[in-house]
Image (cartoon, grey):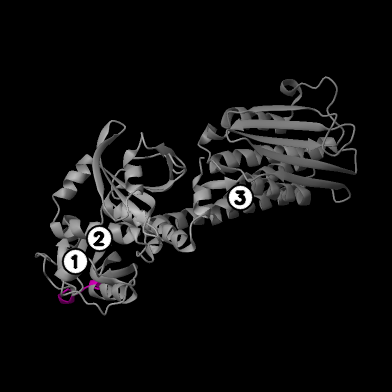
Amino acid sequence: MTVDASAYAANLTQADSDLLKRIRQALPILADISRSDLLLYVPAGAQEAEVLDQARPHSLFPLFKEDLIGTRVDAHSAPWVFSALSRTTLQRGVQSGTVRDAPIVREVLPVLGSDGHALAALSIETNLLAHERHRRRAKEFRKALRQLQEMALRGELVNAEGLTPFGEHDGIVLVDTHRNVRYTSGIAANLFRRIGYMGNLLDRSLDSLDTVDSEVVDETLSHGACVQRETEQRGRIWMRKAIPIYVPKRSWQWLARRRADPEVPGPPGTVPVGVVLAVHDDTSARDKERELKAKLAMIQEVHHRVKNNLQSIASLLRLQARRSASAEVRQALTDTVNRILSVAVVHEFLSYNTGSVINLLEVAQRIAGQMSQSVVDPTKTIQFRVTGQAIYLSSQQATACALVINELLQNAVEHGFEQRSKGTVDVALTDDGEWVGIEIYDDGAGLPQEFQLGEDSGLGLRIVRMLVEGDLKGKFEIRGDQTPVSGSEAGVKAVVAFPKTSLGGARN
């Protein structure tokens, strides 16, 4: 009978369940340090195993782009997994293989449960080039990596989930429990040269360096857990990750390493043998981040000033409209004021948003509010309702949509309710992932008979058509609606649809 991984996990003891949880938390940093893809398999029946978890390295290009969690294998397709699941000791199985016709080296270790039997198997899969480079590294580091992997499978890598990823430009320093450097990667040596340490660090004590490395090592050993610390030194920002390495007291390493300190706390039955320091110079990234924040602040200030200038222009035009003796001029100026204010809404959002995308739902709500206050005759009761989901568009698309919504709402108020004292205007926004829809209904007087959009359109509808077809690359239609949202027997429905990619709009 086939048993899925969730059912398998439900049958575990609490100790074994906790062990798997700790192992899964350690997989991301373990994949980075190992420069390998990690696949954690659990039994899923007598003849199958399932990928319970997966970790891809940040330190080099991963072997697997796709998500393999939940993938099933059997003894024929993945015999190395079932070989590891049959072991009762933490023994490695090493073999060559291929992934997408590329050669790899695969190391598989069992995860031993509380009863001494394998409850899972970890496959460490490395491309052949990275494996050959690792073989040329110092023996001290290769041994430390094996110890770290086995420590993780015993669930002893505490606070691993609190570490940020280890990248390809990060250096590694291996120190023993007496803070003496046992290994330094080439990248780490270059990083220390940036702060003035030009000589060889090998066998040198961290206490002799004017850095916080010795303090970080002390902290991780005193707590028996992984530690991450950010510091600034000589004008550079450093990120340090310290990972303690413990081995069982019964192992040969304990007998061989008399210099290890048994008084240092750690998992029961273990002794510390060293610390892996991952060193990262974050100065350049922070400088770029500060520069970006400064640019964003400047852009936001520009949008704020544009918004204020547009509102000032609108105020001047509104004042001029009040002084005009011509009703036609007043109406033209009022319409222009509303168009300017609809554009100002977009700049207002951009003035306090850090990104370059605008939520169309918020824009529509703001314009509907402005319309209710500035266009609707105070003696009339016209309700505006905006419904739909949040739709994020580029600023160019949002500006065009703001003008479109403004013109259609204004058209509904002026023509649909010219002879009516109350009614409803509904704005409905839709997004199917590829196309955005804007539908505006009113339960007003309806369209004149024989109405033709291309022939009978006023300036407002011509502006809408130009924006939709020209700027948004979409479609626009307006028709009489016999079943409007409000339930009346007449009304008008304006329908706008455009692709989200027409101007590089953002995807939700």
Q: Nearer the viewer, mark 3 or mark 1?
A: 1
Disc 2 crowd rating (10 Å Cα; few below 14, some 14-19, many 20+) is: some
Q: Mark 3 points at which residue?
A: 310
Q: Is residue 328 left or right of residue 364?
A: right
- Residue type, numbered disc 3: Leu
Q: Counting residues from the N terminus, which is met first, the one under dot 3 or under dot 1?
A: 1
Q: Determine if residue 380 is in view.
A: yes
The residue positioned 44% from the left and 39% from the top of the image is 72
Q: Nearer the viewer, mark 1 or mark 2?
A: 1
290 in relation to 3, above or below: below
The residue positioned 18% from the left and 75% from the top of the image is 178
157 in relation to 5, above or below: below
- Residue type, numbered disc 2: Gln
* Secondary element type, mark 3: helix
Is residue 484 located in the magenta-colored stretch of the structure? no
Q: In this view, does 350 lie to the left or right of 40?
A: right
Q: Mark 1 points at which residue?
A: 253
Q: Which of marks 3 and 2 is in front?
A: 2
* Closer to us: 491 or 449: 491
Q: Name the residue under label 2.
A: 147
Q: Quarter-wise, where is residue 395 in the image?
A: top right
Q: In the rendering, at what x and y percent does residue 398 appear?
A: 59, 42
349 in relation to 505, above or below: below
